[in-house]
Amino acid sequence: MGEEAYETMSYYERWIASVSQNMVEAGAFSTAELAKKMAQVKTRGATYGDAT
């Protein structure tokens, strides 16, 4: 993770980026699979999961 990313990301953003990178390196999933899942989640919208 570069200095700019470290300085601009929150603690939890850095944490999930690190875990995701470790999982890719371990072969748990590919970057293409991760990108596909992220695109699916993004289609849920900004308020997905908000309590009503």
Image (spheres, rainbow, N blue to C red):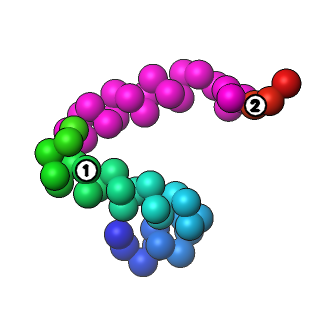
Left or right: 9 in relation to 21: right
Q: Amino acid at mark 1?
A: Met
10 is higher (above) or lower (below) than 33: below
| Quadrant of the image containing the C terminus | top right
The residue drawn where x is 36% and y is 61% is: 18
Q: Give me the C-alpha separation between circle 2 and circle 1.
A: 28 Å
Q: Is residue 47 inside the magenta stretch?
A: yes
User: Residue 30's x, y, as percent?
Assistant: 20, 39
Q: Position of residue 2 (x, y in %)?
A: 37, 73
User: Image point 46% across, 62% down: which residue?
Assistant: 15
**Dot 2: element:** loop
Q: Which residues are magenta?
A: 30-49
Task: Reply above or below: 5 against 39.
Answer: below
Between residues 50 and 46, which one lies in front from this camera angle?
50
Residue 29 placement: quadrant:
top left
Residue at horizontal 20%, vertical 42%? 28
The label shown at residue 50 is: 2
* Residue type marked 2: Asp
According to the picture, the residue beneath numbered tag 1 turns out to be 23
**Residue 2 falls within the magenta-colored stretch:** no
Residue at 68%, 29% (x, y): give it. 49
Does 51 sit left or right of 24 as displayed?
Answer: right
**Secondary structure mostly seen in the magenta stretch:** helix
Q: Position of residue 11 (x, y in %)?
A: 56, 67
Q: Is residue 10 above or below residue 23?
A: below
Residue 1: assigned label: none
Quadrant including the N terminus:
bottom left
Secondary structure at badge 1 equals: helix
At label 1, counting other C-alpha atoms closer than 10 Å, the crowd grade (few under 14, some 14-19, many 20 or more) is some
Image location of residue 31, percent across then percent down: 24, 41
To which quarter of the image does residue 48 belong? top right
Quarter of the rendering containing residue 10: bottom right
